[in-house]
Amino acid sequence: MKREQALHLMILPGLLVLLLFAYVPMAGVMIAFQKFNPARGLFGNNPFIGLGNFTYMFSRPNIGQVFWNTIYISVLKIIIGTFVPIIVALMLNEERNLLFKRTTQTIIYFPYFLSWVILAGIMIDILSPSGGIVNDLLKFLHIEPIYFLGDNKWFPYTMVITDVWKNFGFDTVVYLAALTSIDPGLYEAAMIDGASRWKQTLHITLPGMQMIIVLLMVLNIGNLLNAGFDQIFNLYSPTVYQSGDIIDTFVYRLGLLQAQFGVSTAVGLLKSVVSFVLISIAYYTSYKLFDYILF
């Protein structure tokens, strides 16, 4: 403790923020089991109704579609968002022009720092069916314009592609960092044995990245019910509720627009419990299959 005192002091502000914004608000979980009235306050005499809010939640006619949309979009984001940065990292790792490599890294990493409030405005302009550059290109190719943000058929895939475009730069940098830890002597030995670049990638590079891939997969599986509120809230509309309404946007409308605080808290609590179970299963699986200890 004495030797690492400075490090503990450095992490203290982050722990305080985590405590204040992640653990203290957990006292509000009791709202999920009450007929909550904001006028009475959090610790006021609110009637206890047990699982009434959960029963009402599952009785909603569209709740099944909301859960399906969330899982469908999340799974696609996890799968595509895992393979794309791995492929890009492998391609950049083979690039010998250092200037081109660093420039490409910077370009693909930059969108990660932009908020969805900014990117939503950009995407609305780019994907506009009347004057967007994407539909202008489709018109040039004699293809009918597509209403990407207003068509239930295209909206989920638009969310997945734009999310991967925004975030894959970060994971690419993480995988590139993992590649630097691989012993160059392994590649030299493989070349002496006559291994091609593909064989080296298959038997040296990918196994060297295995632990980082498992780590990011475990963290992503825990977010299976988080389909990206910031993104979808800024890009969806009532016309695409059928395919784009997710748990977080559903909770937002119930809690803030319709003032059904008990029901919205029940939905949020259910999502948190399921996420906890999923990340526990993923962690246990990674430990058993890959002998990888995350925590």
Image: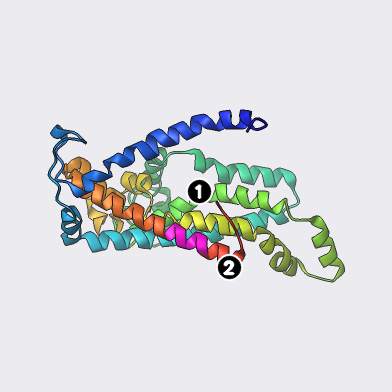
Most common secondary structure along the magenta stretch = helix
Residue positioned 58% across, 43% down in the render: 107
Counting every numbered tag in the picture gives 2
Disc ID at residue 62 = none
Segment colored magenta: 278-284
Looking at the image, is mark 1 or mark 2 nearer the viewer?
2
- What residue is shown with label 1? 167
Tell me the crowding category of disc 2: few under 14, some 14 to 19, or many 20 or more residues within 10 angstroms, Cα based: few
Real-space Cα separation, disc 1 to disc 2, in angstroms: 28 Å
Residue matched to label 2: 289
Residue count near mark 1 (Cα–Cα under 10 Å), binned few <14, some 14–19, many ≥20: some
Q: Nearer the viewer, residue 98 or 275?
A: 275
Tell me the SS state at disc 2. helix
At x 47%, y 55%, the residue is: 220
The quarter of the rendered structure image containing the N terminus is top right
Does 193 appear in magenta? no
**Percent position of residue 52, x then y:** 15, 55
Between residues 215 and 110, which one lies in front from this camera angle?
215
Q: Secondary structure at mark 1?
A: helix
- Residue kind at label 2, given as amino acid type: Leu
Image coordinates of residue 88 in percent, x first then y, are 61, 56
Identify the amino acid type marked 1: Asn
Q: In which quarter of the view is residue 293 placed? A: bottom right
Q: Is residue 102 visible?
A: yes
Give the residue at x 16% y 35%. 44
Residue 35 x, y percent position in the rendering? 14, 45
Q: Is residue 117 left or right of residue 55?
A: right
List x then y, in percent, for residue 127: 38, 50
Q: State the image quarter where residue 275 is shown.
A: bottom left
The residue located at (44%, 51%) in the rendering is 162
Does label 1 or label 2 sit earlier along the sequence?
1
